Image (spheres, rainbow, N blue to C red):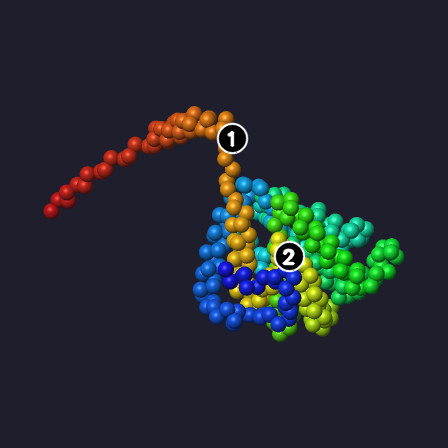
Amino acid sequence: MKADKYIIAENKKTDIRKLPTNSKEDNVEKEDIIAKYEANKQELIALQDKFYADGREGLIVVIQALDASGKDSAIKYVFSGMNPMGVKVHYYKAPTADELAHDYLWRIHNNIPRRGEIAVFNRSHYEDLVTVQAEEIWKNYHMSDRVLDDTKKKFFGKRYEQVNNFEEYLYENSYRMVKIFLHVSKEEQTGQLLERIELPEKNWKFRANDLKVRDKYDAYLKCFNDVINETSTKHSPWYVLPGDQRWYTRYLITEILLSELKACKPEYPALPPEEAEKLPQCRQILADAMAEYESAKDEKKPDEPKKKSKKKSKK
C-alpha cells in the first residue's frame, strides 16, 4: 500500500517539513490513481457495511491540516457512498464556554462512536496541542496556578502524554484511530485562499484573518512537526500525506481506510440458532405469499385484443 510510506514511525524523529507535498516522488499517473480510487471506494462501501453489522470495533479518523488544505472536500468525497447510519462527521470549531469549563478531551470523548461506527473528526483534540500552543492561548486558561506555573515545554509535554494514554485507552477498548495530516505547500495554500476570493461561490469560506494564519505557516508547521512526532504511536499512527494534488490525497486516504477496516476482520454476525431453525418455515411462508401475488396479477391482466384481419383491397 502506497500510504505506508507516509506513516510517522513511533519514536523515530521525522522532520515532516522535508516530506513531499505532491505525488512526484511516487511517479504515478493521474488516470490510474483515479481509477484505483473509484475501485477503492466501492470496496470501502462493502467493507463498511460488514463493519457496521459486526459491531465489534469502532474506527476514529482524525483529519488535521493547515487552513485551506482540503479537509472538508477530502471528507466529502472519500466518505460519500458509505451508509450514513454508520458514519458520523464531527467538526471541532473554537470551544464553547461550556467546553472550556471542562477538560479539553471532554468534548472529544462525547463524540466517540459506538462500536461498528466510523467517526470522522474534522479537526480534533489536536487543536489543543497545536493551535493552543502556536497562539499561546494556554497562558489565558482559567485554571489553577499549579497547572499554569509550568513552563510551556512541561505543560505540553504532559498533554502529549495525556493524549497518548487516551488513545491507547481507546485501543484497549476495541477502537482504532488513524490520524491524517494533509501536508500542503505554502504556494498551494496561497492559491486556495486566492480561489476563495476569486470564485463568488467560495467567498463565504474566506475571512481576512485567514491571511494572518497564512503568515504563520512556518510556525504552525513546526508545531505540527513537534506534535506529530510526540504522538504517533503503534496503535494510533500519524500519516503525513502529500496534499497539493487532491486526487492523490483522496486515493491515499482510501488506502488507509481499507487497511484499517481489513485489520478489523469484520464478519456479518451469525443468526442465533433458534432463529436459524425458523428460516425454512419463514422462507416457505414468504414464497407462498409471493406466489399468491403473482397469481393475482395474472388474473387482473386484460384479455389480449384479437388481431383484426386485414381486408383485401378490391382492385
Residue 302 in the image, given as x and y percentages of width and height: 33, 32
Q: Relative to residue 86, is residue 31 depicted above or below?
A: below
Quarter-of-image position of residue 313: top left
Residue 41 visible in the snapshot: yes
Does the rendering let one see residue 65?
A: no
Residue 134's label in the rendered image is none
Packing grade of label 1 (10 A; few <14, some 14-19, many >=20) is few
Between 287 and 188, the one lying in front of the other is: 188
- What's under tag 1, amino acid-wise? Pro
Which residue is under mark 1? 272
The one nearer the camera, 305 or 124, is 124
Q: On the picture, is 75 further left or further right than 44?
A: right
Identify the residue position indicated by label 2 in the image. Answer: 233
Which residue is depicted at the point 70% across and 58% down?
Answer: 126
* Image coords of residue 306 (percent x, y): 24, 35
Query: What residue lies at 63% left-to-right and 64% top-to-bottom?
Result: 12
Most extreme residue toward the right is 145
Q: Is residue 229 above or below residue 276?
A: below
| Gap in angstroms between the C-alphas marked 1 and 2 | 39 Å
